[in-house]
């Protein structure tokens, strides 16, 4: 009476017997087990936990107790144990998979992009198709031809893609940003089918149509907005640009370097847009003088082959003085669809000795049915003459 309570004073006789039996099985001294029954029974197969310390973790049983989980000189209560067990059971029970949090759309960093995205922009505009083979030279390499299409995507783009797919040819499409925004499905399709997508600015305006001309700020807006759209829709960086009208004012080259885009022009202009416009306006096919467009002089196209004259052998307008002066043949009837096709084919295949031409077509801006129908003939002609079709980055469609 009145003495200090031992660790078993609060236990019933049956409980005392259970403690002693467990202690015997576990090898815990009876005195220790009776003095500290909870700690002794929790500490399996070893010396009792020192007074004032937490029970050692039992890794063999899969239970890891953090060192700070039990306060000093405190014993876990049965209620706390049951709560911990329930929490462990809930953690071990498989539940429905967590709903993934949508990741924010990351816009590719196109301005000052690293080398692994776009190569460094070339210092001069590109006017010849890439060669096939690392050691090839322009004279020894297999002849190559790059088919390029401007101003789309538009109503004719799907049919042109169908034709290229049927022929197994990869081309390069220079898209206008606002047109691509209106038809993103065609943009994605062109990229998915192996074609190279280039930047043709957002609004396709010439320098004289913009207040102040093509300033650095204007070009950054036009090229940047279009590049972001293309990259978001296709998943590829935009490494090539073609200025509308072929204009190359002094501000263009620095803009290309800032965006790491190589300027690509052409060496053969089919002028298919004018050939087909003639049937709508009732005029003969003619080409306005480029020098009259504005104060900024665009790229000078290659001279036509010697002796080409005004026509292509059957009275149709070709690369002669009437075309250069911008004058139509008086009294010439509008071209029929078949004549339009023949004229586009003839222009596209008039090489003037070139072995690596870049051919300019259009898939946007109006009726391009003649361009579509001319393509199989153009492709057949180049294949018959040993040419390999390449994209402007040198890729060959297999």
Image (cartoon, rainbow, N blue to C red):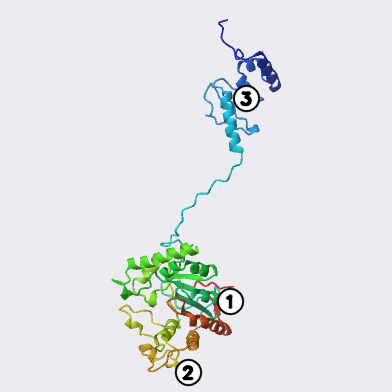
Give the spatial CA distance, label 3 vs label 2.
106 Å
Instruction: Describe residue 184's horizontal placement relative to residue 33 as left or right.
Output: left
Q: Residues within 10 Å of mark 1 (few under 14, many from 20)?
A: few
Q: Nearer the viewer, mark 3 or mark 1?
A: 1
Tell me residue 197's x, y (percent).
48, 70
Q: Mark 2 = which residue?
A: 314
Is label 3 in contact with label 2 (beta carbons under 8 Å)?
A: no
The image quadrant that residue 380 belongs to is bottom right
Instruction: Describe residue 332's horizontal placement relative to residue 143 as left or right.
Output: left
Which residue is found at the position 48% from the left and 89% from the top? 339
Q: Secondary structure at mark 1?
A: helix
Quadrant in which the C terminus is drawn: bottom right
Q: Secondary structure at mark 2?
A: loop
Q: Secondary structure at mark 3?
A: helix
Decide if residue 17 is in sight here: yes
Q: Residues within 10 Å of mark 3 (few under 14, many from 20)?
A: some
**Disc number placed over residue 42 in the picture, else none:** 3
Tell me residue 137's x, y (percent).
52, 78
Vertical order, 361 against 202 (above or below):
below
């Amino acid at each position: 009476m009145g003495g200090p309570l031992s660790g078993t004073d609060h236990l019933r006789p049956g409980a005392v017997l259970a403690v002693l039996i467990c202690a015997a099985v576990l090898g815990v001294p009876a005195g220790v087990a009776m003095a500290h029954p909870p700690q002794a029974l929790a500490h399996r197969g070893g010396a009792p936990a020192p007074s004032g310390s937490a029970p050692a973790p039992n890794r063999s049983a899969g239970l890891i107790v953090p060192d700070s989980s039990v306060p000093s000189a405190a014993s876990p209560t049965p209620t706390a144990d049951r709560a911990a067990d329930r929490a462990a059971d809930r953690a071990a029970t498989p539940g429905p998979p967590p709903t993934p949090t949508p990741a924010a759309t990351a816009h590719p960093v196109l301005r000052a992009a690293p080398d692994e995205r776009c190569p460094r922009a070339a210092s001069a505009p590109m006017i010849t198709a890439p060669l096939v083979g690392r050691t090839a030279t322009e004279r020894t390499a297999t002849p190559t031809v790059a088919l390029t299409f401007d101003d789309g995507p538009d109503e004719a783009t799907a049919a042109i893609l169908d034709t290229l797919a049927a022929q197994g040819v990869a081309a390069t499409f220079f898209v206008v940003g606002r047109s691509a925004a209106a038809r993103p499905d065609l943009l994605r399709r062109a990229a998915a089918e192996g074609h190279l997508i280039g930047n043709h600015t957002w609004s396709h305006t010439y320098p004289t149509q913009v207040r102040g001309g093509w300033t650095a700020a204007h070009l950054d807006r036009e090229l940047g907005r279009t590049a972001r759209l293309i990259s978001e829709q296709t998943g590829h960086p935009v490494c090539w640009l073609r200025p509308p009208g072929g204009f190359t004012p002094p501000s263009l080259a620095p803009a290309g370097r800032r965006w790491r885009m190589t300027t690509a022009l052409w060496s053969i202009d089919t002028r298919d847009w004018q050939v087909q416009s003639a049937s709508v306006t009732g005029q003969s096919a003619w080409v306005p003088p480029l020098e009259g467009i504005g104060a900024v002089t665009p790229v000078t196209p290659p001279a036509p082959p010697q002796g080409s004259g005004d026509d292509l052998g059957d009275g149709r307008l070709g690369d002669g003085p009437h075309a250069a002066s911008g004058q139509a043949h008086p009294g010439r009837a509008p071209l029929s669809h078949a004549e339009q096709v023949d004229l586009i084919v003839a222009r596209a295949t008039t090489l003037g000795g070139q072995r690596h031409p870049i051919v300019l077509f259009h898939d946007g801006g109006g009726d391009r049915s003649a361009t579509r129908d001319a393509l199989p003939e153009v492709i057949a002609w180049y294949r018959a003459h040993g040419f390999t079709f390449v994209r402007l980055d040198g890729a060959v469609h297999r």
